[in-house]
Amino acid sequence: MALSLTIEETNFLRLVALTIGVAPRAVRCYFDGVFHPNNLQTTLLNHQKTIDNLRFRKKVLTSVQYNALFLSGSAVTSKNFDITLMICLLRNISGIAPPVTGYDTLPSPTDISKGADLARIKHYRNKIAHSTDSKMLTQEFDDAWNDVSTAIGRLGGIVFQQECFSLKSSNLDSECYKDILLNIRHSQDEVSHTMANMVEALTKKTVDTKNILQDTVPQNIRGRV
């Protein structure tokens, strides 16, 4: 007999959907506003010395991320960038002010700068990626959801605010959650793969949600595979 998800496991899945599923799109929206798509390739070439330093000396960028920046024979687009790459570029070549406490610490609630919002998303992304039990207490979840969803809204605008609101009130077996979790499964970055494995382990526990990660394809990439 299938088991039901606990409240703590449900909280964890919801935050995964928000942080790994929605946040990258909001960050990409902000990224494209800072680095206009028409000028992105030129901007990257103008900052190649800094980017090379991040890749070869500091070892911040992976070879996959670096290659996505300097594709030969095709136009460079942020659609091929994962969230860690976009945040890295925003931190290092955009000129935006860093949060008061830096990018590697959860910012104070009073710091609502763009740099602080990027740091918030980075913090919770790392937190859930390093979870050992795929659970989250309700108070911790509420605080995290508020932090991440408000950051998403400030970076991406009202459309993303509305999506966050709808997501929190939706059932896990709703279409919006199914599509987000499928996108996580098909994502190419390492953290999303880790999250996909955690999600799959949880969803196998229930009849209602175990079909989420079967061999269907998320709507945004149907027809491309």
Image (spheres, grey):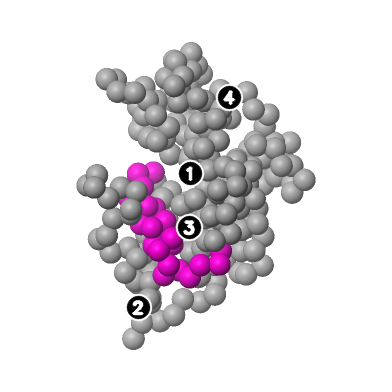
Query: Gap between marks 2 and 3, in whole Å?
Result: 19 Å
194, above or below 175, in the image: above
**Can residue 49 be seen here?**
no
Report the disc number at residue 120: none
65, above or below 110, in the image: above
Foreground disc of the pair 1, 4 = 1
Residue type at tag 4: Ser
Which residue is drawn at the image coordinates 43% and 62% (left, top)?
Answer: 177
Q: Could you tell me residue 94's position as x and y percent?
A: 58, 24
Query: Gap between marks 1 and 4, in whole Å?
Result: 18 Å
- Residue beneath disc 1: 25
Residue 75 is left or right of residue 24, and the answer is left
Query: Gap between marks 3 and 4, in whole Å?
Result: 28 Å
Observer-nearest residue: 56 or 168?
168
Answer few, some or many: residues within 10 Å of disc 3's Cα (few below 14, many 20 plus, some between 14 and 19): many
- Residue beneath disc 3: 17
| Circle 1 SS class | helix
Q: Are discs 3 and 1 less than 8 Å apart at CB?
A: no
The earlier-in-sequence mark between 3 and 4 is 3
**Can residue 217 be seen here?**
yes
Indicate whether residue 221 is drawn in magenta. Answer: no
Total marks placed: 4
Residue type at tag 2: Val
- Residue beneath disc 4: 94
Query: Gap between marks 4 and 2, in whole Å?
Result: 47 Å
Which residue is drawn at the image coordinates 64% and 43% (left, top)?
Answer: 154
Answer few, some or many: residues within 10 Å of disc 1's Cα (few below 14, many 20 plus, some between 14 and 19): some
- Residue beneath disc 2: 207
Residue 74 location, quadrant: top left
Observer-nearest residue: 113 or 190?
113
Segment tinted magenta in the rendering: 168-189
